Amino acid sequence: MSTGQPTQFDKKVFQATREIFVGDKAKTRKCKSVKRYIREYSGDKSSLKQLRTQYGEGIVQDSILRLLSHGLYESTLVAIQWFPDLLEVAGTQNEVVPQPEIAKTTGQLTPEDLPQTSGDECLDQSKSTEATTPIDGGNESIARNGNGRSPAIPVYLPFTVEHMLMEKIQKTLELACYQYGLKFLPNLMQKQGWDCPEAVELTKWTKLFARKGNLVWEGSGQPSKQLLQSIATIRHAAVHRLRINSVGLERFLTNAENLAEVLGNDQFIQTISQLRLHTQETRNELIQHKETIQTQLEIGQEEIARHRAELNRKEQEILRHAESEDRKYRHIAGEKLERTLGLMGDLSVSSNGQGESLESVDDIEDDPISDDYSDSDHDEQFEDCSEV
């Protein structure tokens, strides 16, 4: 599999070996080095051994070399782009924005890093590194929680739909903030020349709300810092076309609804609530379909693994039989040759009857030539021929 497309098998291999290929080891591209690093690793290798047993050492090694060649062990960002669910973000409902160190790893900006300039300038500065960076809203593991229910499994909407949804959330919140400004900040709106919702980007509203502590909130109370950080990230994700999974979308929508409640505008609360419910229904359908596909995939992989194990067993059985037959034939051939050698006996001169038939070299050389055989006879024959 040299296409470079990530698979669930590659993900399992990466998780089983990510602690082995660190530092300079992550830069290796040679089979011998891969084997040596695995052999020298003193940590837990049970997962790797299980993969080798199930799929074969060669297939696992090919996957490791492919992951190494794409730089997954060298860059957390690359690893997350291949396997978005590897990024785990723990937090409360409002803590959607990852911690600063996680945000920097994935190429996201923290609220402190959000641009002071216009959105176009920010886009020019970061589009080269963030165009395809995914934002993960949670852990994709399917472990059971305390209530015995599986947590939400992140899935991805088609990017066109996802981007439309993020733009819709952004514009709705900007309109809600603008309506709030007209009601409670008319002097500031007039001074800044903010005469339409499009004149003020969402991040400016979040900074304004965070800076002014004496604002009047008609809704559920003053917005928290975490809530404002999440709202700022909504605009950032929409502008920079960041990939967001279903869990991230759910949290963004929840926080957008919370901000609308803080602003105290029932119209926007209802609009965002409907968006969240429709998105949740779609996500549930996708999750159900994904679980079905995953189950089918696992069943197929288990069946393949059984067949592979059976083929390996048969191969070993054939090899053992071939080795056994080879040993038997070598033994029979050896016995046959041994009997032949025994019948021949030792090669030595004997005084018995068999030895009497052997003549020495001296005897042959001293044997006189018969008188009947001489050169004169030949001469007479040639003379007769000439006379004829």
Image (spheres, rainbow, N blue to C red):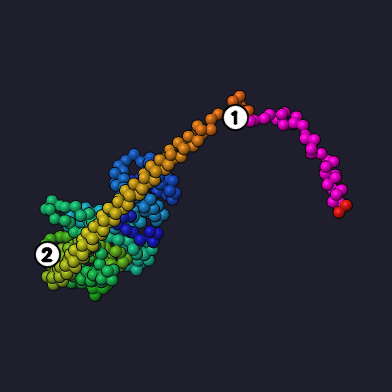
Which residue is disc 2 drawn over?
A: 219
Residue 320 higher or lower than 4, as above or below: above
Residue 278 higher or lower than 330, as above or below: below
The region drawn magenta spans 357-386
Counting residues from the N terminus, which is met first, the one under dot 2 or under dot 1? Answer: 2
Q: Is residue 375 magenta?
A: yes
Label 1 amino acid? Gln
Q: Quadrant of the N terminus?
A: bottom left
In the displayed structure, does residue 244 sit left or right of residue 334? Answer: left
Which residue is disc 1 drawn over?
A: 354
Is residue 192 something one can see in this rendering?
Answer: no
Magenta highlight: main SS: helix
Residue 282 higher or lower than 1, as above or below: below
Q: Farthest top residue?
A: 351
Badge 2 element: loop
Badge 1 element: helix
Label 2 amino acid? Gly
Q: Quadrant of the C terminus?
A: bottom right
Q: Position of residue 276 (x, y in %)?
A: 17, 67
For disc 2, the neighbor class at 10 Å (few under 14, some 14 to 19, many from 20) is some
> Which picture quadrant has residue 128?
bottom left
> Tag count in the figure?
2
Callouts 2 and 1 close, C-beta under 8 Å: no
Task: Please name whichever residue, 237 or 369, is drawn nearer the observer in this view of the structure.
Answer: 369
